Structures are given as C-alpha cells and as structure tokens.
Image (spheres, helix red, strand yellow):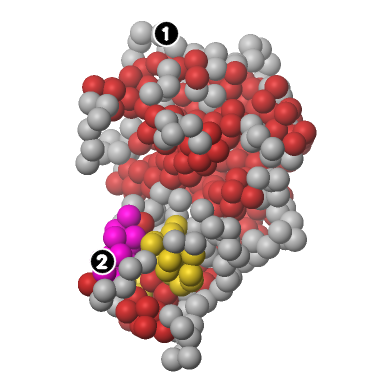
C-alpha cells in the first residue's frame, strides 16, 4: 500500500517550521531559562521533523529524496504546515513591517499547538503505519512536556501583572482565528484517515477546546472568538511570512548544495 | 531497517553462555557522552546485539527525538568495536520508544552519585491499552505527577524547587536545593 507522504510531510513541516521559529529566541530569550527552553523545544521539534522526513525519503525510494532535500530544497507552496506556525513572534503586522519579538505570542502559539499535538500524537500511536506509530510514541512524550511548559507560562503571564495579562489576551485574540485551520479537514487528511495512517483532526476539536478552556480560565484569560478567514497553510497556500522563514533557513544549503560538515 | 521486535525495559548484562557475551562486555565501556558515568546499556539505549542479514548488528535507540548525542554514541560504539576487531553495523531503531523507566537501578544510583537526581517512574504507561485523558492532563493532578518532590542528590533534602523546566541537555531540568543551596540537574521522566 502506498503511504500518503503528503500527510507525513504535513506533520513534519509543522514541526520544522515551529522549530525554526522558536529557535529565533536562541540567544535572545527574555530570561536565560526561557532561552534554554525554546532551544530545547526546537531541538525536540526538529528531531521529530527529521524522523518524519527520513521516513518519507525511505518510502519514496527514488534515490533522490533525502531529509535535507525535503527541508532545504522545497519552496513555500510545497510546505504543508499550518499557517499559525509560520507567523512571526508578534501580533498582526503589515507584510513588510518588523517588530520586536513578543514572548506572549510565542507562549500562546506553543500552547495552542501543543494542546492539539498531545491529542494527535496520542491517536497516531495507533497508526496503520508502524513507523509513524513509533515516531508518534516518542513525540507524544515530548509534546506533553511542551504543553506543561507553555501552559504554566500561559497561567503565569495571564494571571500576572496588568500589562502581562493584557499582552497575553492580545496574543490569544490574535492567534485564535488561525486555529480554525485545524478543524477543516483537507483531502490529504481525509485520505489518511480512511487508510488508518492518520486521523481527521476535526474529531479532536471538543477535547482540544476542553484543554484550552481549562487553561485559559486558570490564566484569567477570555476564550476569544475564532471566526473569520480560515487559513490554508496545510494546502500549500501560505501567508507572506513563510517565504522569509524559508529564506533564512534554506539559504546556506542552497548556496552550497554539495557542502558537507 | 530490520523490524525485529526489541525487548522493553532494562537490559541486564548477559552471562557467559550468551553468544555475543564478548560484544556486550566490550560495549560496557561505552558511556553516554553527556553523562560519562553510565553505560549505554545501563541507560537503556543499547537494546540488542543480533545477527542481521549483513552480519552482526548492534541496536541502539534514541532518547529524545532531537538528541544531538546520538551521532556520538553511534560513532563511539563503532570505534570501540573496531578497535577490538569486531565488525558490526550500528542500527538505530526507534520502536519501542525509549523510556527513562528502562534505566537500570545501577544507572540511577550512579546518576545520583554523579550529582544528577534520577528520574521518577513515568506515571502513564505507554502501552497501547493506556487511555490518555486530556482532562486529567490539564488538571492539577497532572502537575503534581510531573512536578513531584525531587530530593537533592547532594544532601537528600526534599526541600527543593525547579529553577528551569529545561537544562543543559534535552533530558534534564534544573533544580536547586533550598536546604544546602546547591543547584542540581534532574533527569526528567520520559
């Protein structure tokens, strides 16, 4: 049976792009402990991405596909990550504007994504693809810790000072609409669910809302409406931000394609 | 990649009747690059020594998905064996997923003596039968399991506090003792 590699790439790209984003804090963290936290978080995410890319390369068996090719030599339209994960660490900006990184956006995004992935990885431990099930078993352990970390900061900052509360609420209000993309099943996800490789993430919505609601309440934050435009990153149609992420991440490999360590 | 089913749990050093006894013995000297007091077997990273299609295979399993020490361990195993004239392929197999529960009792004692608080047993079993409950996860019950009392490896006091969720390596968190005031690493349950 041919395995749906688009679905695997979706999982891998999610991990790689968020890993790349969170690694931006390396050397710039708001405090030393959080600098280390984001570096470690990225290490786990990029590690998960590598396992998945290696799996895709093994499945394609075309003698050409490698983890490096998938990470460094695909363009934005070929990436299948959620749009949420490619956004800069700041609230809404004009496309060409840049702002200071805002840790509240980092924490809220990590929380919203980890709350989803703790459910996804747990379910994927039963995948019909035994190799994906093995990756899920490892990733599940890691994402639990990411969720515990981001959840504790969500509460600490949400239920913190007037300013930290205000910034956290702004981050929740900004990011929540992007989570709508989780619940609109794409063709690759529907196929993956039919073959038992993956699952329809929409079936996890109630469980996700329960985790999110519980933490937001403890953090004294309001669950904001997630109405409006539904992003389509997982279909390969991204925001303007992904190109900048890829330019930074891929430029070295593309400038020196045959370089080795 | 071979799909042989690997054992779960701690691996004891086999006795002399085992056909690969010599190889097991040789690999006792290969330690975790970040924690040079425990061997790969004691850490639960060295899973099996077996005969594959192309000869002898040494099977190791990664700890964290992104652990950068994996390459080093791979090379250390190969170098140790080739110095002794043993030709073997090092196979990295990810299933079943490594757990800190697989560390031997000796390894935990050595970590403690080295100044690293050893991991608590994982609360949740990762057997396919176990049902993950997100509500329990989100509640205070989970927090008390994750942030259990960690005794200080220096003075034994239970009056300790977490200073950082993440530490010097992927597998550790940073703690400090409020009794003897020493900082220490805690090996996180995984």
Q: Which mark is residue A94?
A: 1
Q: Is residue A204 above or below residue A105?
A: below
Judge from the rendering whether residue A197 lies leftward or rightward of residue B23; answer left or right: right
- Residue located at (70% from left, 54% from top): B132
Tell me the crowding category of disc 2: few under 14, some 14 to 19, or many 20 or more residues within 10 angstroms, Cα based. Answer: some
Judge from the rendering whether residue B172 lies leftward or rightward of residue B181; answer left or right: right
Snapshot quadrant of residue A112: top right
Q: Quadrant of the C terminus of chain A?
A: top left
Q: Is residue A53 above or below residue A231?
A: below
Most frequent secondary structure within the magenta stretch: helix
Quick one: SS at disc 1? loop
Judge from the rendering whether residue A70 lies leftward or rightward of residue B28; answer left or right: right
Which segment is the magenta one?
B71-82
Image spot of residue B120 (x, y percent): 52, 71
Q: Is residue A103 above or below residue A45?
A: above
Q: Which mark is residue B89?
A: none
- Residue located at (74% from left, 40% from top): A196
Image spot of residue A66 (x, y percent): 42, 35
Residue sitting at the far bottom:
B16
Total numbered labels placed on residues in the image: 2
Image spot of residue A201 (x, y percent): 70, 33
What whole-number distance in Å separates the C-alpha atoms at marks 2 and 1?
A: 54 Å
């Amino acid at each position: 049976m041919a395995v749906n590699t688009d679905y695997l790439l979706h999982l891998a790209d999610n991990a790689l792009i968020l890993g790349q984003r969170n690694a931006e804090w390396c050397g710039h963290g708001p405090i030393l402990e959080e600098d280390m936290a984001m570096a470690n978080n990225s290490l786990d995410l990029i590690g998960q991405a590598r396992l998945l890319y290696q799996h895709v390369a093994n499945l394609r068996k075309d003698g050409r596909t490698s983890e490096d090719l998938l990470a460094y030599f695909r363009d934005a339209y070929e990436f299948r990550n959620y749009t949420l994960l490619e956004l800069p660490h700041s609230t809404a900006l004009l496309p060409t504007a840049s702002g200071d990184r805002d840790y509240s956006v980092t924490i809220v995004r990590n929380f919203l994504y980890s709350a989803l992935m703790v459910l996804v990885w747990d379910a994927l431990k039963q995948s019909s693809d035994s190799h994906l099930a093995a990756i899920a078993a490892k990733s599940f352990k890691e994402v639990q810790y990411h969720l515990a970390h981001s959840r504790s900061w969500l509460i600490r900052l949400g239920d913190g000072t007037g300013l930290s509360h205000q910034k956290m609420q702004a981050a929740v209000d900004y990011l929540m609409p992007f989570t709508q993309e989780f619940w609109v099943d794409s063709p690759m996800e529907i196929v993956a669910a039919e073959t038992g490789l993956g699952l329809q993430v929409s079936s996890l919505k109630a469980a996700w809302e329960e985790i999110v609601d519980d933490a937001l309440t403890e953090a004294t934050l309001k669950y904001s409406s997630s109405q409006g435009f539904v992003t389509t990153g997982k279909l390969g149609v991204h925001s303007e931000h992904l190109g900048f992420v890829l330019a930074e991440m891929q430029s070295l490999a593309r400038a020196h394609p045959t370089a080795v360590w | 990649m071979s799909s042989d089913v690997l054992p779960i749990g701690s691996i004891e050093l086999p006795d002399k009747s085992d056909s690969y006894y010599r190889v097991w013995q040789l690999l006792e000297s290969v330690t975790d690059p970040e924690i040079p007091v425990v061997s790969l077997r004691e850490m639960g990273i060295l899973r099996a020594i077996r005969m594959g299609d192309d000869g002898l295979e040494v099977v190791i399993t990664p700890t964290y998905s992104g652990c950068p020490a994996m390459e080093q361990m791979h090379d250390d195993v190969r170098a140790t064996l080739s110095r002794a004239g043993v030709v073997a392929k090092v196979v990295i197999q990810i299933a079943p997923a490594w757990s800190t529960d697989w560390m031997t009792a000796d390894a935990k004692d050595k970590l403690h003596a080295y100044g690293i608080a050893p991991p608590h047993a994982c609360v949740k079993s990762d057997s396919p039968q176990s049902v993950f409950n997100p509500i329990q996860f989100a509640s205070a019950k989970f927090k008390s399991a994750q942030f259990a009392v960690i005794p200080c490896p220096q003075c034994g006091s239970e009056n300790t506090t977490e200073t950082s969720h993440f530490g010097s390596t992927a597998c550790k968190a940073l703690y400090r003792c409020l009794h003897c005031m020493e900082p220490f690493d805690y090996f996180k349950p995984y």
